[in-house]
Image: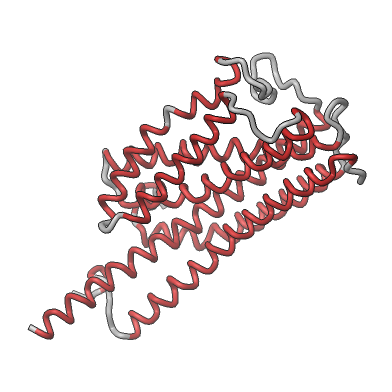
Amino acid sequence: MPVIDLANPTRFLNVVNRVLPWLIAATLILFVIGLYRVMNAPDDYQQGATVKIMFLHVPAAWLGMFGWGLMSIAALGTLVWRHPLADVAGKAAAPIGAAFTFICLVTGSLWGRPTWGTYWVWDARLTSMLVLLLLYLGVLALYWTAEEPGRGARAAAVLSLVGAVNLPIIKFSVDWWNTLHQPASVFRMGGSSIDPALLTPLLIMALAFTLLFLTLHLAVMRNEILRRRVRSMRLLQAQKLVEASA
Amino acid sequence: MNLGPHADFIIAAYAVTIFVITALIAWVVLDYSAQRRILGDLEERSITRRSQRKS
């Protein structure tokens, strides 16, 4: 099937229904492997066992940012090509991205207390991540409160594009400002500074969480397409009632 | 597995993550079954979308 056929919601639903069971199975397998490696990973020489929080915190941070990146690309599809599936993709990514950003902030706070001595500090990395969560909540509010879905979609798409400015700020905040948060240690010039005994389980967990994100995203997109069908059928039902009473 | 003196923080981090992800999955599953049920009800009442109608 040509990729362009996926732009048709009915064909897209058929593909999603076929792909989802495989994605769920792959996600579960990766989580079993990842968690086994996490349980057997050595303690950090400085942080001790609290390094185990890294296996949740780092993938959640990446996926919080990935979700917004996805929404920004979908926003272009909504505003430039006005494709309904682009809006569905953007709307579906928002609650998932917000959930991962929330996990990132909470796990980071729980990691910060034993390692930094504080749950929270207003440094650039933490603050820009909090701003990302607030932006997610703003987009969700636009989607959920708009009376006319198209208007809400356009407003959310504009906010998604404007909010994308925050992504490089999050990424480079640790380089641009003096922060309590450590600088990049996985993807950086000269290779990762993390020992392979910790890096391997981290990458497996990151892959597992990414598959979970994609699985949930496709499932939420499917729900949203069905919701829009329900809406259009209810409008037709209302129209019939008006015509019958006229 | 010995989680050391900060076990509470590690357990809390994993508990929060499991709770949030479980809630997300539950919402997706419940929403899917709700939309399917509503669509089924509407189709039983012979309400079809324009694209489903035979010309």
Q: Is residue A125 above or below residue A17?
A: above
Percent across and percent down for residue A18 are: 52, 61
In this view, the residue in front, A175 or A206, is A175
Q: Position of residue B16 (x, y in %)?
A: 68, 51
Residue A95 is left or right of residue B51, and the answer is: right
Residue A10: quadrant of the picture? bottom left
Q: Nearer the viewer, residue A14 or A192?
A: A192
Coloring applied to the structure: secondary structure
From the viewer's perspective, tell me whether residue B6 is left or right of residue A152.
right
Name the residue at the right extreme. B2
- Residue A162 screen position, x and y as percent: 36, 32
| Residue displayed at 22% across by 73% down | A236
Please determine whether, in this image, residue A154 is positioned above or below residue B41. Answer: above
Q: Does A246 sit above or below residue A214? A: below
In the image, residue A208 above or below residue B35 = above
At a point 72% along the width and 46% down the height, the residue shown is B13
Give the residue displayed 27% in from the left and 79% down from the top. B47
Q: Is residue B43 left or right of residue A165?
A: left
Q: Residue at x 40, y 37 (%)?
A: A72
Viewer-nearest residue: A153 or A50: A50
User: What is the number of callouts on the image?
Assistant: 0
Q: Which percent across, then down, holds residue A92?
A: 45, 52
Q: Quadrant of the C terminus of chain B?
A: bottom left
